[in-house]
């Protein structure tokens, strides 16, 4: 009996031990669950907002605008009320005709303790006076150091009697879709305001040549323009510039110019008071699938040169029809990437440009010019075709959905073409054809087919036959409209 009692006692002890272990496991599980829930709960953004707010500023601009010279904009012209409003203005001593001062609001941020401020160009454009209001309420007058309309960035400067709180730029390329961001600024003139969201998309392009926007759903409204977009480290990764909205208010689609673009612009504005972008001197278009097939390329990548006006590229030997495969050691995927890379290159730098020409790869050294000096001077040059293939009498033919006629002096004058240009004028386009679908229209001029010059119908027929013999499904045409060239690939059919 005594042995049995001892045995039962040990069993009870084991049971108690097991229960204690189970309760311990449950307690540990509960602690882990509580810790996980605490981590999952979003942290307050207040400490970060308090840290970076002093560097964000409100910007007020003042501009003198001419007064109205009459009742235009009040009543329609010719309205029976027109005389009434004119008499009303006369009785008020013509006050409506006097110049008046117009104000606008925007945002910005301080990037150095000595008072450099970044904002959007459109915030301060044409302003006579620019006033910076700081988070403390202090106001200072700012002067414009430089602007860049292409990226909509402006650099201002204020003179303060003490070091100013400022923020630093972060690496916008490190921002990932889904990362938290904070937008700060002066929305709708309501004063300092903070909104939070995430990075919705990267590398957005709106309309500019050098666009690289971060898309965010953080609320951005009128007045936020020029304000900073912060990452969670308090670094500026974008400058709030635009919104997509049907009603003018935020619907969660905002755009901030990426900081890696902004910093390059700011550095140049600070040093030179203007931007100095590299210039290659070519007109280009993307290599599409049909263009790649027409040229016998394996992949639809690179930038196809459509024209080489007077400039660095022509001096170096680049030609129309070359496909740029790499620039300064970096592979070229499309025209947008090439334009940005060229623009970011130093003026006067010698770079290696690798092109595909006649099926062979060549590397050509080009000394870059300056984009700003070339603006407006890159009109296409005349083709040096001479009188090759000139026809004494016009000959018309229909090929690939196009009705074509060799250029004559009369046609050149009618179409505004250079006197020595040779080619085929499009006199009609079948609206059911691929040519019409791809945008060819009456008045276009075809100067090349298969990357060789054409001056007569027989020239084109030879190019078509040669392409078919080579097993190609399409033919690449160089088409000019109003002097602007582009390549179009048309199917050859059976």
Image (cartoon, helix red, strand yellow):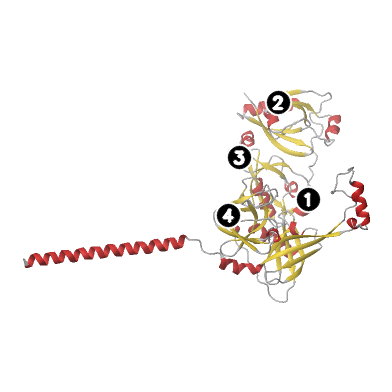
In three-dimensional space, the C-alpha distance between marks 1 and 2, rounded to whole angstroms, equals: 37 Å
Question: Which of disc 3 and disc 1 is earlier in sequence?
Answer: 3
N-terminal-most mark, 4 or 1: 4
| Pointer 3 or 4: first along the chain | 4
Q: Quadrant of residue 9?
A: bottom left
Name, please, the residue furthest toward the bottom.
161
Front-lying residue, 74 or 380: 74
Q: Closer to the N terminus: mark 4 or mark 2?
A: 4
Disc 4 to disc 1, C-alpha distance:
34 Å
What kind of element bears circle 2?
A: loop
Instruction: Confirm or deny contact between disc 4 and disc 1 (CB under 8 A).
Output: no
Per the image, the residue denoted by label 1 is: 375
Residue 401 numbered tag: 2
Q: Which mark is residue 300?
A: 3
At mark 1, the secondary structure is loop
* Quadrant where the C terminus is found in the figure: top right
Side of 382 where 45 appears, left or right: left
Pick whichever of labels 1 and 2 is earlier in the sequence.
1
Q: CA distance from mark 1 to mark 3?
A: 29 Å
């Amino acid at each position: 009996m005594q042995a049995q009692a001892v045995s039962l006692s040990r069993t009870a002890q084991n049971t108690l031990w097991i229960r204690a272990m189970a309760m311990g496991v449950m307690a540990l599980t509960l602690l882990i669950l509580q810790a996980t829930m605490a981590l999952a709960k979003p942290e307050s953004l207040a400490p970060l907002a308090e840290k970076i707010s002093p560097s964000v500023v409100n910007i007020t601009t003042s501009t003198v605008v001419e007064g109205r010279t009459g009742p235009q904009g009040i009543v329609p012209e010719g309205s029976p009320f027109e005389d009434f409003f004119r008499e009303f203005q006369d009785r008020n001593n013509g006050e409506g005709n006097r110049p008046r001062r117009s104000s606008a609001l925007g945002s910005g941020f301080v990037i150095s303790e000595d008072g450099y401020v970044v904002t959007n160009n459109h915030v301060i454009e044409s302003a006579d006076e620019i006033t910076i209001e700081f988070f403390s309420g202090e106001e200072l007058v700012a002067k414009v150091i430089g602007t860049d309309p292409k990226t909509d960035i402006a650099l201002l400067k204020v003179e303060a009697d003490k070091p100013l709180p400022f923020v630093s730029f972060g690496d916008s390329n490190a921002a990932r879709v889904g990362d938290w961001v904070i937008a700060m600024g002066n929305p709708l003139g309501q004063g300092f305001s903070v909104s939070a969201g995430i990075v919705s998309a990267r590398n957005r392009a709106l309309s500019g040549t050098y666009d690289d926007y971060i898309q965010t759903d953080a609320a951005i409204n009128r007045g936020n323009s020029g304000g900073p977009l912060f990452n969670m480290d308090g670094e500026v990764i974008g400058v709030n510039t635009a919104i997509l909205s049907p009603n003018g208010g935020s619907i969660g689609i905002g755009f901030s110019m990426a900081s890696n673009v902004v910093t390059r612009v700011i550095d140049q504005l600070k040093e030179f008071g203007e931007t100095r972008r590299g210039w290659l001197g070519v007109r280009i278009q993307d290599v599409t699938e049909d263009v790649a097939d027409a040229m016998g390329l394996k992949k639809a990548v690179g930038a196809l040169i459509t024209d080489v006006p007077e400039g660095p590229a022509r001096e170096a030997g680049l030609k129309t029809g070359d496909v740029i495969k790499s620039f300064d050691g970096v592979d070229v995927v499309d025209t947008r990437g090439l334009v940005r890379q060229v623009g970011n290159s130093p003026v006067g730098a010698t770079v290696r440009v690798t092109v595909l020409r006649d099926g062979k790869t060549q590397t050509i050294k080009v000394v870059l010019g300056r984009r700003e000096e070339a603006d407006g001077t890159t009109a296409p040059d005349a083709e040096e075709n001479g009188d090759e293939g000139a026809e004494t009498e016009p000959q018309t033919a229909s090929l690939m959905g196009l009705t074509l006629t060799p250029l004559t002096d009369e046609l050149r004058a009618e179409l505004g073409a250079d006197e020595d240009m040779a080619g085929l004028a499009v006199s009609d386009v079948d609206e059911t054809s691929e040519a019409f679908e791809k945008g060819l229209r009456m008045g276009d001029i075809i100067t090349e087919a298969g990357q060789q010059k054409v001056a007569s119908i027989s020239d084109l027929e030879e190019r078509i036959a040669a392409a078919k013999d080579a097993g190609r499904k399409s033919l690449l045409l160089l088409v000019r409209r109003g002097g602007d060239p582009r390549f179009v690939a048309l199917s050859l059919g059976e």
